[in-house]
Image (spheres, rainbow, N blue to C red):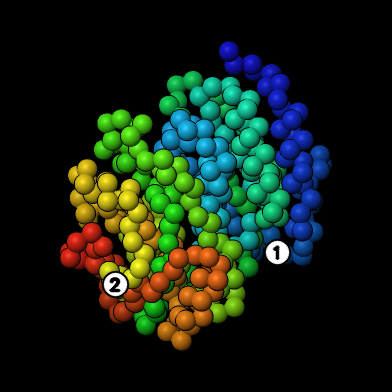
Amino acid sequence: MYDTTKPYISEIERIIRTTWDTKYLRVDERGIHKKKPFDYTAMFFDHVDGIGTKGMDHWRKRTFDAAVTDVLAMNLNDFCLARAIPTSLCDHIFLPTDDREAIVQIVSHLAAECNMRHIAITAGETAIHDNMNGMEISMMMSGFKRSVEPNQYRQGDILIGIGSSGAHASGFTRIHSVYDDWELLPESITTPTLIYIDVVDSIDRVFGIHGMTHITGGAFTKIKRFLGTCDAHIGRSHNLEPHSIFWDLLEKGIPEKEMYQTFNCGIGFVIGVPVVKKSVCLSTLKEAKFNADIIGNVTSGSGNVHIQSKFSDQEYIY
């Protein structure tokens, strides 16, 4: 039975209060007070995202820490595209049952991650929906842009791909559609999304990145948003191989062309850099323990993405 008084609320409040004093903000009962002299008016940035259908698998396997990492990654990695720095967030947790253990674990892990990243949790809500098949965590993350440089690939750029950890948190409705029994999904299905913002932001500050894409919903078609009149060409000779889950999905009947417009197929993030910066960028990524490789280049064109499939000798244009 759902207890509308939420008897765990004081415990939740105690946990989130641990995030109320960061290098950017101080939070108290009166409101949010900024510490750093950044311009909220000109540089303010918000982003909203959640874990989507993957929440069914996280709930079934009770992988709550991984679920928190997923929702943070989906927001932080897109903050990276905007060259923005997160300072606070508001979370919304949906559960199918009033599970105190799950709620406390979720909020505790979220607070721990936020404390490491100087992000204040300024508000939140827990909702119990007994008609849900799983859980959902979504959040609005707020911060400020450190640069107004546009996110745009340029002719002559070298494309560097950064490996994924698996399916990340995209395409799960399609994944579920081809499995008759979700219990047959591999254990690795709840492996969390990699967080790229730390290393990519560092590379951008030191060496300069022209274009960036977080390969999530829409997969490689998302690159088109940042091409302008250029074309992106992605080859198959790189070392970023599709994980076993992607081969399974292909064998279960998902068309090969659809794979690259639905799933990351082993590449979670793409950056475009000048030719002279490719070696130092690759070295920085590998020093940070990311699997990365040159996957292609950018030419003049009409805004299309050309992909040589890793699954066959086919090439697809999006």
Give the class, few, some or many, for how many residues have Cα within 10 Å of label 1's Cα (few <14, many ≥20): few
- Res. 80 visible in picture: no
Point out the residue furthest to the top here.
1
- Res. 105 visible in picture: yes
In the picture provided, is 101 more to the left or to the right than 237?
right
Q: Amino acid at mark 1?
A: Asp
- Residue 235, x across and y down, in percent: 28, 71
> Helix, strand or loop at disc 1?
loop
In the picture provided, is 243 more to the left or to the right than 78?
left
Q: Which residue is mark 2?
A: 237
Where is 54 relative to 278, above or below?
above
Q: CA distance from mark 1 to mark 2?
A: 45 Å
Dot 1 and dot 2 residues touching (CB under 8 Å): no
Residue at 24% across, 52% down: 258
Q: Quarter of the image containing the N terminus? A: top right
- Residue 310, x across and y down, in percent: 26, 62
Give the class, few, some or many, for how many residues have Cα within 10 Å of label 2's Cα (few <14, many ≥20): some
Residue at 59% across, 30% down: 102
Residue at 59% across, 71% down: 202
Q: Quarter of the image containing the C terminus? A: bottom left
Q: Which residue is mark 1?
A: 39
Q: Amino acid at mark 2?
A: Ser
